[in-house]
Image: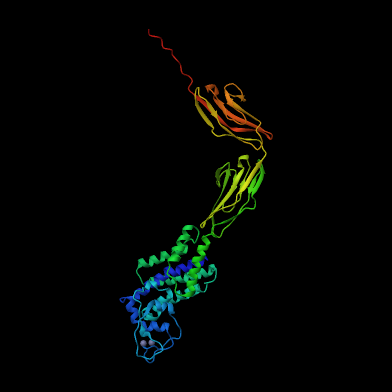
Amino acid sequence: MEKLVRVFLFLQTIITELVGKFLNKQLQPDNFQTFLLNRKHILFHLYRNGRPCCACSRNENLGHQQVVKKVQFDLLYVQGNNTCNVRSYNHSCIYSAAPSVKVSELDVTLAITILKNCFANSLNLHELQSLDDIRKIRNDIAHNARNSDISEKEFCRMWSILEEAALKLAKAFDQEYFNDIKSKMRQQRDRRILATSEDYKEYSKQLTNMKDDLTESLGIIHERLISEIQTLFEGRGSPAIKIDKSDITATHGDQVVIPCSVVSNLPVTHVNWKRTSNNVSETILNDDSGYQGSTPVTPSLTIDSVKLNDAGTYICLAENAAGATISDPVTLIVNGGAPEVQILQSYYTNIYGKEVVISCNIVSDSTVTGIYWKKYYKNKVLRINNGDKGYQGITPTSPSLIIKFATSDDDGTYVCHATNSAGISTSNSATLRIKGGWYICVKRNNPY
Ligand SMILES: [Zn+2]
Ligand SMILES: [Zn+2]
């Protein structure tokens, strides 16, 4: 559809406007209504051909083909209630120029018909050729009224003929207008079609604002393109996400793939995954380490080495210009493995004499049976167990290390260890520095 939209818009916007402007130039110094009045007889017989009218002279040479359709003629002329004494099959006399019709309201075929029939003598060969070419391409486009699109080759052929014709007609105007037409054509050719929602809005707007084409075939294309663009973007337009599984069970350390496929008429611009665990949702970014996929090309999410806190509910979101779709949820269950122990802050400073809490989180598939901490300082290691003097915490339910009265002796690096039936694991480390503690208290002598 895209190539057809492109060439259709070229014809219906740039070319139509240019041909209208070209016709206006030929009309000068008359206005359109005066022109219509003066040329009524010619135009009437382009509509009602074959048989003479009340205004015909004896040897009128009447064409045999209806060139102007009724709907086109009705745009140009209105019927009055003249009475006519001439006995005739046709009465052109009853028509007068439509009072408010403007050249800009004519479709390209009608404008060309007027130019060819009323101004042939004042146009040069290039201009006449251009008008013929435009009409021919317009008919070629119309023949595609029910085809889904045109081939690349056909597109290029139509485009280059229209482009050449446009440039030849534009030569009748000043350089500024010529350049303007040139740049408009380039824009229209290079313009992306339907890649983003902005494109969609703009195309929709352009198609909807475009005057109705009076001719049936282009009218069909016009309506079809509008409705196809609408359909493409509304409802059916956003991507469809397929996930076959609703839950996945993995063992700690496994590589886990949450498979999903995205089907979309439009280019998929964005894919991401979201994990919800304990009512906390977190978006997984494409470049988060430990993950692969989650891109428009590879939407499935791969977790390199699954951890217990990867467990949760996953949903995939895929987006294209028409909108975003959210997948059904997939539950990931992670079994086994030693506990996962994490210290959230890696550096603590504290004031001498105050309490310090080195917080630590533990996630474990099975019950945590033991906790202890180790302190590394001055090339020595101290193991700290629950119940050791000066410390609190260090239990499976409250694993954080609490130092009740911190002194510079507590300076060091701390790690936490947790055990369950599968094994023991070690956290990352945290460093503690205690400030102060070297106050010298001078007892003032009693001056009395
Ligand atoms: Zn006549
Ligand atoms: Zn008459």
Residue 199 placement, left or right of 57: right
Residue 96 placement, left or right of 440: left
Residue 186 x %, y %: 44, 64
Give the quadrant of the C terminus: top left
Q: Tell which residue pokes out farthest to the right in this image.
A: 421
Residue 13 placement, left or right of 378: left
Residue lying at 58% horizontally and 50% vertically, measured from the top left: 316
Residue lying at 50% horizontally and 28% vertically, measured from the top left: 349
Q: Quadrant of ligand 2?
A: bottom left
Query: Residue 169's quadrant in the figure?
Result: bottom left
Query: Residue 335's quadrant in the figure?
Result: top right
Q: Tell which residue pokes out farthest to the top in this image.
A: 448
Whether residue 24 is situated above or below residue 323 in the rendered picture: below
Whether residue 256 is situated above or below residue 61 in the rendered picture: above
User: Viewer-proximal residue, 358 or 409?
Assistant: 358
User: Viewer-proximal residue, 206 or 156?
Assistant: 206
Which colour assignment does the render follow?
A: rainbow
Residue 106 x %, y %: 40, 74
Residue 253 placement, left or right of 445: right
Whether residue 226 is situated above or below residue 73 in the rendered picture: above
Count how many numbered circles sit on residues in the image: 0
Residue 199 x %, y %: 47, 60
Residue 275 seen: yes
Whether residue 197 is situated above or below residue 314 in the rendered picture: below
Residue 279 x %, y %: 56, 42
Residue 125 seen: no
